[in-house]
Image: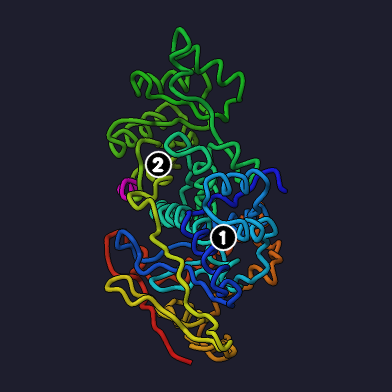
Amino acid sequence: MTARSTALLTDRYELTMLDAALRDGTAERRCVFELFGRRLPGARRFGVVAGTGRLLGLLADFRFGDAELRYLRDEKVVDAATLAFLEGYRFTGSMTGYREGELYFPGSPILTVEGTFAEAVILETIALSILNHDSAVATAAARMSIAAGDRPLAEMGSRRAGEDSAVAAARACYIAGFGATSNLEAGRRWGVPTMGTAAHAWTLLHDTEEDAFRSQVEALGVGTTLLVDTYDIAQGVETAIRVAGTGLGGVRIDSGDLPTVAAQVREQLDALGATGTKITVTSDLDEFAIAALAASPVDAYGVGTSVVTGSGTPTAGMVYKLVARQDAAGGWVGVAKASVDKNSKGGRKAAFRTLDAGTATSELISVADGFEQLETALSHPDARALHVPLVVDGEVDPAFVGTVGVDAARAHHARVREELPVTALALSRSDPAIPTVYVEQ
């Protein structure tokens, strides 16, 4: 039993399906589940895969210990035979999927889970809760990163999210282009660089703004950033330079009409001789506000509420569906939901990104109805294969977990974002930047 089980991060119907499948003999049928999004929420032009490394890391803790089994027994969720099965549960199947940091589009088979029905079906909720949240945050963060251009971004939205979600959001932002976070646990757990100096409470604590600035400079050095808008911004800037000198690292503005205020502060700093002092703005920014500041003398952005809540799109809207299974005779068949507006595409899939001179032109999905060998990149020389093995026979590839996995995902995202066509960089609502094309094997 591990110290922290993730097994009950599960919807009840997954265990009641398992219970019934063990009774009727279908629990051991080999199955293929697929996690994908039918559309891009918010009419965005691309999505960013995030959370894969977290899911793989938590897979090891997906164990039913005494406390979990006791709860299920006391609540009569499943019968004794199912409890016995869960006591020895270990995922021994395989997962393939898009690398974390990869771009995705409608229908992209982001994660494929292969195993028995019994071991694969109960992973639905944890897989979706992680990837839906983290991908929504990463997609918003990527749009903000594009809007910011070369100017650095810091995530500072922990106070606007649940405590665990805040850590996950900081991780997702870093993968998608942010350079730092205010969240110390994200720094400890995932290696995300941390930043932060002082809030308005620091200034209000002291008898004067000058006392607050002088104390901060003495503690952190002249390279620190002073928050200048607690009272009067112009007076705050003048006091900051008088206290720290023209070598002051930066000033932060957290209120006002930012384009106007930033221009005024830059003019004042230059007039005082502080031409190297940077301006950071942090007032309720989203990708649109950041884009509106492109022509302003702003050096860095701090983003909170908007990015950790997906900038209006708090979930990626992904689903986890059975797409292929063995029949009673042991043969493989593709299966799919046919409901109006919620239909899915049956069969195992291989995914490729077609490219023209390095620019993405389509999401190419090759579909195999049975269990024949899936197509490889050799079949599509003008494309990049998107699937990589993540878990093989229950063993997680360590390259995708921990801080190593975060760094790899961040680097991968930076590379693949260069493949986006120019139209994908616009922030307005539109169709996906590239079409999704299905081909039957």
Give the mark, 1 or 2, whose residue is nearer the N terminus.
1
Nearest the camera: 228 or 71?
A: 71
Q: How is the image coloured?
A: rainbow
Tag 1 and tag 2, C-beta contact below 8 Å: no
Q: Residue, x 60% and y 25% (percent of image)?
A: 220
Nearest the camera: 208 or 192?
A: 192
Horizontal and vertical percent position of residue 31:
55, 76
Horizontal and vertical percent position of residue 7:
59, 52
Query: Mark 2 belongs to which amino acid?
Result: Val
Horizontal and vertical percent position of residue 431:
29, 70
Report the magenta stretch's main SS.
helix
Q: Residue, x 42% and y 39% (percent of image)?
A: 304
Q: Residue, x 50% and y 18% (percent of image)?
A: 213
Q: Is residue 125 above or below residue 120?
A: above
Q: Is residue 271 above or below residue 30?
A: above
Q: Report crowding for label 2: few under 14, some 14 to 19, many 20 or more residues within 10 A (C-alpha).
A: many
Count all numbered tags in the image, as a single digit: 2
Residues at marks 1 and 2, CA–CA distance in whole angstroms: 34 Å
Q: Residue, x 60% and y 60% (percent of image)?
A: 82
Compared across the picture, whether 59 is left or right of 33 comes to right
Q: Is residue 96 visible?
A: no
Q: Give the magenta-colored segment's residue range.
A: 288-295
Q: Is residue 76 visible?
A: yes
Question: Which residue is at the far top?
Answer: 207
Horizontal and vertical percent position of residue 387:
56, 75
Label number found at residue 298: 2
Q: Quadrant of residue 93?
A: bottom right
Which residue, given by chain and number where applicable, does mark 1 sit on?
A: 52
Compared across the picture, whether 302 is left or right of 247 comes to left
Nearest the camera: 236 or 325?
A: 325
Magenta-drawn stretch contains 375: no
